[in-house]
Amino acid sequence: MPDWMHDALCAQSDPEAFFPDKGKFTTDNRTAIAICQGCAVRKPCLEFAVNHRLEGIWGGLTVRQRRGLREPVQRDPNTCTKGHDLTPENTSASGRCLMCQRETSRLYEQRRRRGKEYFNAG
């Protein structure tokens, strides 16, 4: 348990208010958020929740509210999202990775063949 948790105001409150049923927002949630607003360790609490993808109300925010706070993953601009090198030989005129395009085409063809086999088997 991180040290800051001992100083959190929620540690002296009803934990049920901070962990509502999924999709439900009640007056208990508003109470929990109000408690967080006055807490001295709100920032480390929020960072902890974002980094660990925790359920419930942390740092005064719900799970939905925290979703947009995650840091985008930094990747090399010379590679595609799957990590292939984007060399002139491996890049289409539109700037897409040819290896990924080939892989997608191969998978599409496999699915198409399986679909034909399924319908011809009956």
Image (cartoon, rainbow, N blue to C red):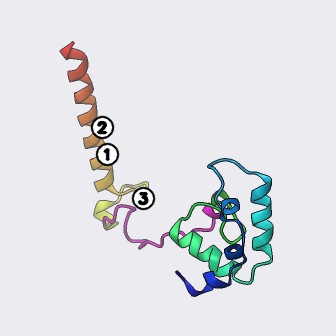
In this rendering, is residue 111 above or below 61? above
Say whether marks 1 and 2 touch (CB < 8 Å). yes
The CA span between labels 3 and 2 is 21 Å
Q: Amino acid at mark 1?
A: Thr
Q: Amino acid at mark 2?
A: Tyr
- Lower position in the chain sequence, tag 3 or tag 2: 3
Q: Quadrant of residue 13?
A: bottom right
Front position in the image: 94 or 21: 21
In this rendering, is residue 25 above or below 108? below
The answer to if 1 sits in the magenta stretch is no
Query: Disc number at residue 95?
Result: 3
Q: Quadrant of residue 39?
A: bottom right
Q: Amino acid at mark 3?
A: Gly
What is the secondary structure assignment of the residue under circle 2? helix
Q: Which residues are magenta?
A: 65-84
Report the residue at 75% width, 58% height from top.
29
